[in-house]
Image (tube, grey):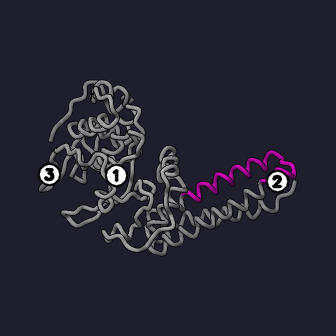
Amino acid sequence: MVIFLLNQASAQDDISWERVWNKEVQSAAESDSTKVRDIVKWISNRVEYETDIRYQKNRSNINLPVAKRAYLDGKAVCIGFAKLFQALCEAANIPAITVEGVAYLQLEDNFENHAWNVVKYGGIWRVVDPTWGSGHIENREYQKTFSPRFIDISFEDRKFSHYPYDPALQLHIHPLTFEEFNNRELSTYTSSKSFDSQSLDSILQNYSGLTDTSALQRSLEFKPDDLFLKQLLADEYMQIAEKHIQSCIQWYSQGPDQEEINTCQEIIRETENWLKKSQKLYLTVKKERKRSSNSSTDVNLQNIERNLKTLHRMKSFSP
């Protein structure tokens, strides 16, 4: 195990990724493609993959964002590699996104949750896996081996190895369904969802992760049985509804006129739809996971019922 001694950084210091890029990565490259390669190579030298699951519970900087933990600890799992790569790309003025999804491990014939990146250079969005590009596990030990083959991975090479939850992050005009990825075989099924280069670029330029409603809706279209995604989307629907409810309550407390009340009544009807969508998803999650009555899902369902009653009372409001 390599131990890194940090002279200037500590768990309490605010890390400047621009400083790390300029002073530590020290890439003299002129092209973004070479800068990306230099970043992955630097991460490979700087960070080890942590194979001990106890690290997840006992890591020294547990309250810090994962990119900072990876940098300070000198070890991480895939999400740490991906977030650190994204931070350094952004410091180098290269657009990058952290991707969450599923990876297929051919040697183990197994699937696991994984994180990697999409990055834009040369006018094209490309896939980079800084974890797999930094090394590999052999006999349960991590072996550092920088591998450029995991930089700008072609769709052909990753279509059955990297499956992002959001199909837009496949960077392909006709994304694979999860069934196709799971079976590692293209079927005659053609999804109704497709992307042209312009719409894809627009999505990626404004990407805000799986907390975005449209990203979750796309994800469930391609992986409809995923309870994790259903839970996330139900949470998002409920949060949207609760924000609308608070806005209307504040509006009503200020003595609105009839026109403002009519506008708020329209918002109330939309909010009811958000709550009912959330309720339907939570009920599905509860049924499939067979959770107890004390679960967070039940608490959320109770909150939805209370919110629906609040909306019903607000409907009858008159100035």
**Quarter of the figure that contains the N terminus:** top left
Mark 1 residue crowding within 10 angstroms, few (<14) / some (14–19) / many (20+): many
- In this rendered view, identify the residue nearer to me: 235 or 123: 123
Q: Is residue 122 left or right of residue 161?
A: right
Q: Circle 1 sits in a helix, a strand or a loop, which is it?
A: strand
- Give the residue type at disc 1: Ala
Residue ID at (44%, 63%)? 228
Task: Specify whether residue 258 is painted magenta.
Answer: yes
What residue would you read off at disc 2? 261
* Residue 141 badge: 3
* 18, 9: nearer the viewer: 18
Spatial CA distance of label 1 from label 2 is 46 Å
Q: Is residue 296 visible?
A: no
Span shown in magenta: 236-263
Label 2 element class = helix
| Quarter of the figure with residue 272 | bottom right
- Residue 181 vs residue 51: left or right? right
**Mark found first going from the N terminus, 1 or 2:** 1
| Residue 314: % across, % down | 77, 59
